Image (tube, helix red, strand yellow):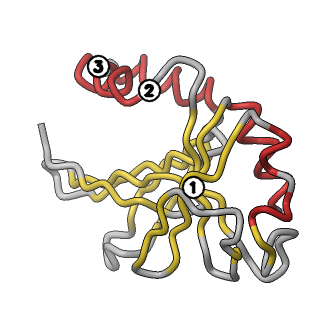
Amino acid sequence: MGHVEETQLPGVGIRHDFTTRAGERMGVIAHRAGHRDLLIYDHEDPDACGTVVRLEADDARTLAEMLGSSQVSEELTHLQSVAGLSIDWIPVRNTSACSNRRLGDLGLSEEGAASVVAIVRGDRTIPSPSDEEVLADGDTAVAVGTPAGIRHLFELLQ
């Protein structure tokens, strides 16, 4: 099995890249919204994508079945998940409803199905932020909750 590089893309998801034995560079971005982007990098510029194919969840499952989905991958996915619980990274921009506002003023605790458990600010992480913490442009709010709660929290913050 070839070497797979994993890159966290705050606010987007996770990108996995690898190079085939024939020297082709490929990757997949697993978006927090559930879809996948299949990336085929350019031959001349290995940092540029020559082709990007968007795959909805059912498309990705079909392709995985066609390629012979890995038991190792299935086991890792199982180990990283807790039934009914999700984690997501929500970007904060100056146009976001939560920008320059204290967490306590956003009414997040009233919702209850998801919580902001950390804030990523540049190279620093603020774990278990207090209600006094102010979300700023460029921050990433790390949320944990039910999938529906995460979607609702995303809408509140954006």
Q: Which x, y percent locates residue 13?
A: 52, 53
Quadrant in the picture for the C terminus: bottom right
Using residue 24 as the reference point, say whether residue 39 is left or right of it: right
Residue on which disc 1 sits: 142
Q: Earlier in the sequence, mark 2 or mark 3?
A: 3
Alpha-carbon neighbours of circle 1 within 10 Å: few (<14), some, or many (≥20)?
many
> Which residue is painted at 52% across and 77% down in the image?
121
Measure the C-alpha gap from mark 2 to mark 1.
Answer: 16 Å
Residue on which disc 3 sits: 75
Question: In this orientation, which residue lies closer to the viewer: 132 or 44?
Answer: 132
Using residue 138 as the reference point, say whether residue 63 is left or right of it: left
Measure the C-alpha gap from mark 2 to mark 3.
Answer: 10 Å
Q: Which x, y percent locates residue 143?
A: 61, 49
Q: Label 3 amino acid?
A: Glu
Q: Is residue 31 above or below residue 75?
A: below
Using residue 53 as the reference point, say whether residue 78 is left or right of it: left
| SS category of the residue bearing label 1 | strand
Q: Which of the labelled discs sits on residue 81, or is there none?
A: 2
Q: Which x, y percent locates residue 123?
A: 40, 80
Residue 125, quarter of the rendered image: bottom left
Q: Label 2 amino acid?
A: Ser
> Which residue is painted at 59% across and 67% down in the image?
140
| SS category of the residue bearing label 2 | loop
| SS category of the residue bearing label 3 | helix
Quadrant in the picture for the N terminus: top left
Question: In this orientation, which residue lies closer to the viewer: 70 or 125?
Answer: 125
Q: Earlier in the sequence, mark 2 or mark 1?
A: 2
